[in-house]
Amino acid sequence: MIGVKLRSVWLTRLVARSVVAALKLLFATCRKESVIFPGTNGWNPDLPDRFLFSVWHDVLFFPLLVAKPHNMSALASRHQDGAYVAEILRLLNVEPYRGSTTRGGAQAVKQLLNVASQLHITLTPDGPRGPRREMKDGLVFLASRTGLPIVPAAFSCRRGLRIKGTWTDMLVPLPFTTTYCILGEPIHVPADMTRDEIDRNKQRVQEAMDRLYARVDDWAAGRIKRADLDEVMPVRDAA
């Protein structure tokens, strides 16, 4: 039994290292463009404030690879695929915590509450099982408990492949393309919310995410220019 477990751990690490090596090589070939709301650059190791970054599951690896994360934590599910994700996160300088809305969630939330003053938190609010790009309660609940502002984080690329999964796809940029990132204005939610307040604030974040992803996709497709984004967020903070 111990031998089987050791082989499983060894295999997980081998797969994770192979994936990270391939992704780093791929993203190294890409040109990066970003528009970042002032004071929210989670890639800056000297950023004094901490944030809760909201990223859709289908672009999960973009914020980890367009630049090196600093002072970052993230949630990985307790399913087997979560073991691979957790190891990948470690290799990319992100502290993983295991849990989800269905398995180990309470313990994971407790751990994140304990580190919220030291680390940013990145969550995929439509995970771990979808529906695709549909906000669940967890992000808003965690923001309410930690007091961290939510930063909508949108990513896209000029040319990429979408790999189909069971409930969502995964966007992978093609070599030598351009990746695009927009970090939006922080969203503050109150503490000790009622059920109606959770629903209202969840809808606020959903609308902000939908709006930002529409913009980043338009930017990647060439339908809008950088100047169109400067009207909304006039300061660019390079990643």
Image: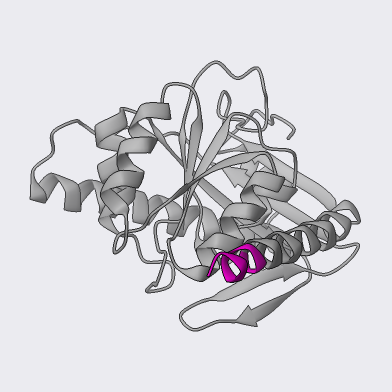
Q: Position of residue 128 (x, y in %)?
A: 42, 66
Q: What are the residue bounds of the magenta stretch? A: 1-8
**Which residue does the image show at 88% across and 52% down from the upper left?**
28
Residue 32 visible (yes or no): yes
Q: Is residue 14 left or right of residue 152?
A: right
Residue displayed at 60% across by 32% down: 42
Prevalent SS, magenta region: helix
- Numbered disc total: 0
Q: Residue at x 54, y 47 (%)?
A: 153
Answer above or below: position of 95 versus 132.
above
Identify the colour scheme used.
one colour
Q: Which residue is depicted at the point 88% across and 57% down?
A: 25
Q: Is residue 228 visible?
A: no
Q: Can you say whether 90 is above or below 163 in the image?
A: above
x and y, in percent, of residue 63 in the image:
64, 48
**In the rendered image of this protein, does residue 149 appear above or below residue 23?**
above
Q: Is residue 226 left or right of residue 48?
A: right
- Report the quarter where the C terminus lies: top right
Decide which of 218, 125 is in the foreground and name it: 125
